[in-house]
Amino acid sequence: MPFGNTHNQLKMNYSAAQEYPDLSKHNNHMAKVLTEELYAQLREKATPSGFTLDDVIQTGIDNPGHPFIMTVGCVAGDEETYEVFKELLDPVIEDRHGGYKPSDKHKTDLNPDHLKGGDDLDPDYVLSSRVRTGRSIRGFCLPPHCSRGERRAVEDLAVEGLGSLDGDLKGKYYALKNMTDEEQQQLIDDHFLFDKPVSPLLLASGMARDWPDARGIWHNDNKTFLVWVNEEDHLRVISMQKGGNMKEVFNRFCTGLTKIESLFKDKGHEFMWNEHLGYVLTCPSNLGTGLRAGVHVKLPCVSKHEKFGEILKRLRLQKRGTGGVDTAAVGGVFDISNADRLGFSEVDLVQMVVDGVKLLVEMEKRLEKGQSIDDLMPAQK
Amino acid sequence: MASTFSRVLTGRRTAMLLASLGTGALATGYLMSDINYAGAIERRKLYPPSADFPDLRKHNNCMATNLTPAIYSRLRDKVTPNNWTLDQCIQTGVDNPGHPFIKTVGMVAGDEESYEIFADIFDPVIKERHNGYDPRSMKHHTDLDSSKITHGQFDERYVLSSRVRTGRSIRGLSLPPACSRAERREVEHVAVQALAGLKGDLAGRYYRLGEMTDLEQQRLIDDHFLFDKPVSPLLTCAGMARDWPDARGIWHNFDKTFLIWINEEDHTRVISMEKGGNMKRVFERFCRGLKEVEKLIHERGWEFMWNEHLGYILTCPSNLGTGLRAGVHVKIPNLSKDPRLSKILDNLRLQKRGTGGVDTAAVGDTFDISNLDRIGRSEVELVQLVIDGVNYLIECEKRLEKGQDIKVPPPISQFRK
């Protein structure tokens, strides 16, 4: 159902110049691309479900950006958004994903056997390993745009599908609005619970509407496979465990995802995917694999090295604090993960993390002993 | 067909015409299928109203108390001429189950027609919020003749400042939850152009939020004039903070006694204020300023949203009628400790707030005392009520100072008979 500015016809009574947003103080991908001419060209369009240009860009207008971090500034309301508004989104995608062109094809590879190594990251340094991605269910609007009925239908499908998982993937669903205080505390202690978004980047796009209706968390009994339902995407799928056995984490990740996909197919549903954009998600930054494979790793020496940033860049890795995307590192422990999402397969990206973290740990050990790491400097991947 | 229709309807003149025709013209509303997007009909079939009905079991606001599945079902697929829907009206109430101190309203209007098209829910909400005012059967009387005010000078040993505020909406333009950027800019243009025509003690200047210098900003903060981007989820969930700070600003006269906020929670908020206790003068300036501004917008073919049942139309149903809050900051150290204060205020139809505004607690012995009601009594009546009530409170304070006892006054009737 329409949300926000979808009463588009009314705006056609005003000229594009009168409606064009003031982006003069803005610094996000959308603001870099959206000229007044482009705005004029696209403003009359809407996807079949009624998502309009203003819906796409509202979050980018309301959040001018950060001088150091380049946010995306636009979201999709449904699968068709990426097609109907391609004149805006293609350049945004190209800019965000390192030059990915509209004609490029994205490779999906969820075969864990293709991963080399990854089972021997030093647990004295690597505290935990995690792989996450997202999936959208074709035929339903995405979180910025979905109606309550749609969101509930997504939840029902997810719960039904996940309920059929067995073996070490067997688990339970906790609806956000129904959980007991004990369940809630347990989920917090396990670091599983997600809460209503507070980031204005998310709020301004409308994904937090009707909270906590149809939101929930599913996890297996072993607490190593976790699915978030209706947070920033329809589904966020997470495989994680303590220690450095990324191979096992990735194995479970691929097995779980493949199983879930086939369970959905049995019921006549598939994931949003195409050969150009890979898996389609709400934020253009998560297209392709939507994959972030990362570790919490102790790098107190390396992180203080003057070339730390450069090393990460060459390894195509990024650092975050252990609280997640908006946090700073505490006690020399960093969250190190792949920087890319699109244009590389899942196996490619996890391989980069495995190889890169191995190298970083080696560097850390050298620096601990006061030795140089100059010979270990990697080439640009 | 649909697009011609909407082009006809969105003209300002047409909006004024329809509004003046009164309630009947828009009662049926316009069905969603009139909107030209491909999947509309299929989606309605796939998701009947019952699939979309919000879960309000943990909610405590006026919308949640009054919205039944039957009402939702009748109204879900209707739209106003500006294509505004019920879901958009109630989103803020769905997202904000309740407030610990106040029973919030839980819904907003996107345009003047919202109150009519969605009357099935707005009417009971208005009735609950305004303690029984029934828009179907009752009429609201507007009176901005300040000469009728008596005893409007307070004892300044007790009253530190006096203030009257209201809001005005420009007919034909969508309200802050719904407006497009161009509409919001048009509101700004209409208002600022009119304000530029004010003369004498009302002459002043406009400061656009996005363009003020640091110096100007600091001065406006020091004067307690500056409003900032809303942080309250009650407002942000309703969509009023979109595109901030585009087309938002503050106008005030050079004397700093008459202030207009543009495009915050309403198209315009009008405030008259002074240090001290001369409420009569504050209200006189208030009425004069409002009338002047109205005259100036009329000259350019615009008018305020108003009708004889709802009075002045504003974004939040709690501000219908007069939209008026007349209040003072008053020092009542003895009375503030008296357990009868709440009852006294209730009977006088007054409310107390902290001096920081609606969400604050009282600091020390100084309270913000203002009228409880907004609709069903005219501006003159409400201001007189505040004057008489505050004078009574001051009398109580003086008596308690001398060790004398005070009396709880009999309750004032809520609506004029």
Image (cartoon, coloured by chain):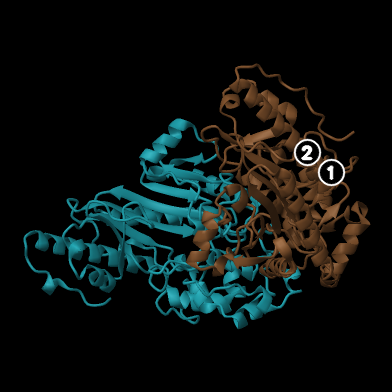
Q: Is residue A108 left or right of residue B12?
A: left
As displayed, is residue A113 above or below residue A216?
Answer: below
Q: CA distance from mark 2 to mark 1?
A: 9 Å
Crowd rating for badge 2 (residues with CA inside 10 Å; few <14, some 14–19, many 20+) = many
Q: Is residue B319 left or right of residue A71?
A: right
Can you tell which quarter of the image residue B304 is in? bottom right
Give the residue at mark 1: B148
Q: Secondary structure at mark 1?
A: helix
Q: Chain of mark 2?
A: B
Whether label 2 touches label 1, CB < 8 Å: yes
* Rendered image: mark on residue A107: none
Give the residue at mark 2: B384
The colour applied to the residues of chain B in this rendering is brown
As displayed, is residue A108 above or below residue A37?
Answer: above
Q: In the rendered structure, which amino acid carries the disc numbered 1?
A: Lys
Q: Earlier in the sequence, mark 2 or mark 1?
A: 1
For the colour cyan, the matching chain is: A
**Position in image of residue A194 (x %, y %):** 45, 46
Residue at 84% across / 66% down in the picture?
B298
Q: In the rendered structure, which amino acid carries the disc numbered 2?
A: Gln
